[in-house]
């Protein structure tokens, strides 16, 4: 909802019914002889027509023009009531339904989408104009009852308008939070996908330059792999740019990945050359939720990217994915020497946030056998036919 008008959000049939009802009340009041007051002419008719006309154009008025118009109409209505109080004595001609019904609807719309500074002035003026009219010529039991009934209608309209205003504000806050979450997700995707491919391109280019003089026959395959990695990086970037441009469309979700994509990551890592990568799978993975498999895929991707960047002298990388009853453990370790400060950065921070979102934990640091290791423990919700495990989940330990 854009908040430009309550009337615009009503179906055309309901809007026509509302406007037709107001016109019908004008005709009813006219037939009842409530507009022509002796020698003073149709003073009340002018006020009623102005109010109904304001309802008709209210969908085209913005948040400032609408309460300004409502203030003007409320002032006109109060002036008519004051004039009737001076010129008439104990007359039933003070009553009428079209003008008060139109002012009540304007009260609802102003409370719903009027600019706060002007709405704060328009709302009390409209309420006063609605309540004062029945008792403008006489204060007796019947007129007091009518004033109370119209006051109840005005309070109801005000409550509905304010409720819809608060609901719209809450939806806007949720939309803003969702956009912020999407931007964070896009930043993670940019690092996870594009940085992974670009790192592979750099490593392959360095390898091709190193072997160009000694084994020139290996250069064309290396160039082909570089071209493939570059194409994949461009595809990922186009995908993310397309999601950013589709601001008015549906929420763009992170691409989903499974254990098969983890195997592909390991195979591509080995194909680039340099360190060998092996994958150990233990357990069943068919019933894993997509958020668990996607997070496991990101853990492996980030860890392999860091091996390319930071592990000097690395000859072997071990990737293991172990499924137990209530958790999935992902370990990636290498036998290389780490550069100073390689344990920090946006990659591991974003990875820790992603793992923490599903209630998991992640640790990264040197391993006892040498090299560097990353281990993530991801909780697996029990399936409907499987009772939950009694063992409590370990507290999350995020990598910095």
Image (tube, rainbow, N blue to C red):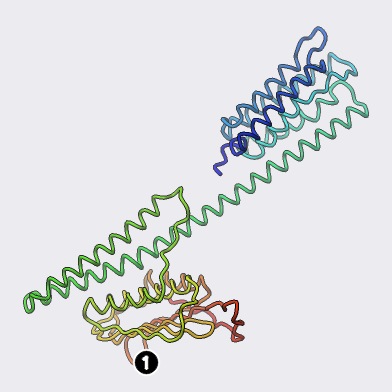
Whether residue 292 appears in this view of the structure is yes
| Residue of label 1 | 368
Q: Position of residue 256 (x, y in %)?
A: 42, 67
Q: Quadrant of residue 51?
A: top right
The front one of 272 and 394 is 272
- Residue 158's place in the image compared with 375, above or below, is above
Q: Residue at (79%, 12%) from the top-left corner?
A: 36
- Residue 173's place in the image compared with 290, above or below, is above
- Residue 84's place in the image compared with 13, above or below, is above
Q: Quadrant of residue 42?
A: top right
Q: Residue furthest left?
A: 213
The front one of 266 and 185 is 266
Q: Position of residue 188 (x, y in %)?
A: 40, 65
Mark 1: give few (<14), some (14-19) or many (20+) Cα within 10 Å.
few
Q: Position of residue 136 (x, y in %)?
A: 84, 23
Q: Residue furthest right?
A: 141
Q: Residue at (56%, 37%) from the top-left corner?
A: 4
Work out which quarter of the rendered image holds the C terminus and state it.
bottom left
- Residue 35's place in the image compared with 328, above or below, is above
Work out which quarter of the rendered image holds the N terminus and state it.
top right
Q: Residue furthest top?
A: 39
What is the count of numbered marks? 1
Whether residue 372 appears in this view of the structure is no
Q: Secondary structure at mark 1?
A: loop
Q: Residue at (15%, 72%) from the top-left corner?
A: 221
Q: Is residue 335 left or right of residue 162?
A: left
Q: Position of residue 12 (x, y in %)?
A: 61, 34
Q: Is residue 343 left or right of residue 268?
A: right
Q: Residue at (29%, 78%) from the top-left corner?
A: 267
Q: Residue furthest bottom?
A: 369
The front one of 232 and 40 is 232
């Amino acid at each position: 909802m854009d908040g430009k008008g309550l009337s615009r959000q009503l179906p055309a049939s309901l809007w026509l019914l509302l406007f037709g009802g107001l016109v019908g009340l004008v005709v009813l009041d006219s037939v009842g002889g409530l507009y022509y007051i002796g020698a003073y002419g149709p003073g009340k008719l002018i006020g009623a027509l102005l109010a109904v006309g304001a309802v008709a154009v209210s969908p085209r008025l913005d948040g400032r023009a609408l309460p300004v118009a409502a203030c003007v109409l409320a002032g006109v209505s109060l002036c008519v009531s004051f004039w009737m109080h001076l010129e008439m004595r104990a007359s039933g001609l003070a009553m009428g339904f079209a003008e008060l019904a139109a002012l009540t609807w304007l009260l609802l719309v102003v409370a719903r989408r009027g600019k706060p500074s002007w709405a704060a002035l328009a709302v009390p003026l409209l309420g006063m104009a609605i309540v004062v009219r029945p008792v403008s010529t006489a204060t007796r039991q019947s007129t007091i009852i009518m004033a109370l009934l119209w006051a109840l209608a005005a309070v109801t309209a005000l409550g509905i308008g304010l409720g819809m205003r608060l609901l719209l504000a809450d939806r806007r806050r949720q939309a803003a939070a969702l956009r912020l979450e999407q931007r964070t997700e896009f930043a993670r995707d940019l690092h996870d996908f594009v940085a992974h491919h670009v790192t592979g391109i750099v490593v392959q280019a360095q390898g091709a330059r190193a072997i160009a003089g000694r084994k020139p026959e290996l250069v064309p395959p290396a160039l082909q792999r570089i071209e493939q990695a570059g194409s994949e990086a461009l595809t990922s970037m186009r995908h993310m740019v397309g999601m950013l441009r589709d601001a008015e469309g549906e929420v763009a979700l992170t691409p989903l990945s499974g254990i098969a994509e983890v195997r592909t990551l390991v195979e591509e890592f080995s194909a680039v050359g340099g360190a060998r990568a092996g994958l150990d799978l233990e357990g069943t993975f068919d019933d894993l939720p997509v958020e668990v498999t996607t997070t496991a895929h990101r853990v492996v991707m980030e860890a392999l990217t860091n091996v390319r960047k930071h592990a000097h002298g690395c000859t072997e990388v071990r990737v293991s994915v172990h499924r137990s009853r209530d958790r999935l453990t992902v370990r990636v370790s290498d036998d290389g020497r780490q550069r100073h400060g390689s344990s920090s950065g946006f990659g591991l921070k974003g990875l820790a946030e992603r793992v923490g979102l599903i209630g998991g934990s992640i640790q990264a640091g040197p391993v006892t056998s040498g090299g560097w290791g990353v281990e993530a423990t991801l909780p697996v919700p029990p399936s409907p036919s499987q009772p939950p495990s009694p063992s409590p989940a370990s507290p999350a330990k995020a990598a910095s």
